[in-house]
Image (spheres, rainbow, N blue to C red):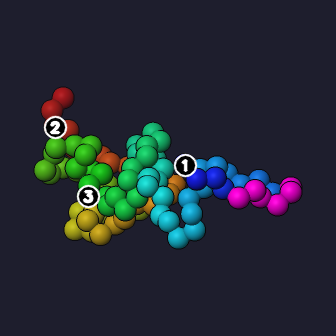
Amino acid sequence: MTQQPAAPEGISVPRAAAPKGTAPATVSVSVNGEARAVPAGTDLGALVGALTQARSGVAAAVNESVVPRGQWATTTLGEGDRVEVLTAVQGG
């Protein structure tokens, strides 16, 4: 463990602050209304795959915008994103 230099008087420095230029290991997103930490750089396709095994009948939206399935792999989730994943269910 390395010690951080003392901050100038009157300035607080969070202990867990990442060094400048270092990306966070996780980002916080909301998935179907529940907070979840996901690895930084996670794309929508990976998240949907972790939530459901369904190969069809799945829709996803990020920040209230529907994302076409063909764009899931290129839609990287960021801090504070709101994700909704919907799966069609048949029957009554």
Query: Label 1 amino acid?
Result: Met
Label pair 2/1, CB-CB below 8 angstroms: no
Q: Main secondary structure of the magenta part?
A: loop
Packing grade of label 1 (10 A; few <14, some 14-19, many >=20) is: few
Left or right for 13, reference 17: right
User: Which one is earlier in the sequence, the residue at label 2 or at label 3?
Assistant: 3
Q: Quadrant of residue 92?
A: top left
Distance between mark 2 and mark 1 Cα atoms:
55 Å
Mark 2 and mark 3: span between their CA atoms?
23 Å
Q: Position of residue 52 (x, y in %)?
A: 22, 43
Q: Residue beneath label 1, please?
A: 1
Looking at the rendered structure, the secondary structure element under dot 1 is loop
Which amino acid is tagged 3? Answer: Gly
Residue 34 position in % (x across, y down): 45, 39
Per the image, the residue denoted by label 2 is 90
Q: Residue at x 39, y 50 (%)?
A: 38
* Label 2: which secondary element: loop
Q: Circle 3 sits on which residue?
A: 45
Q: Residue furthest right?
A: 9
Residue 33 visible in image = no
Residue 25 picture location, percent across and down? 43, 55
Residue 72 quadrant: bottom left
Find the magenta span and give its range: 5-10
- Tell me if residue 26 can be seen: yes
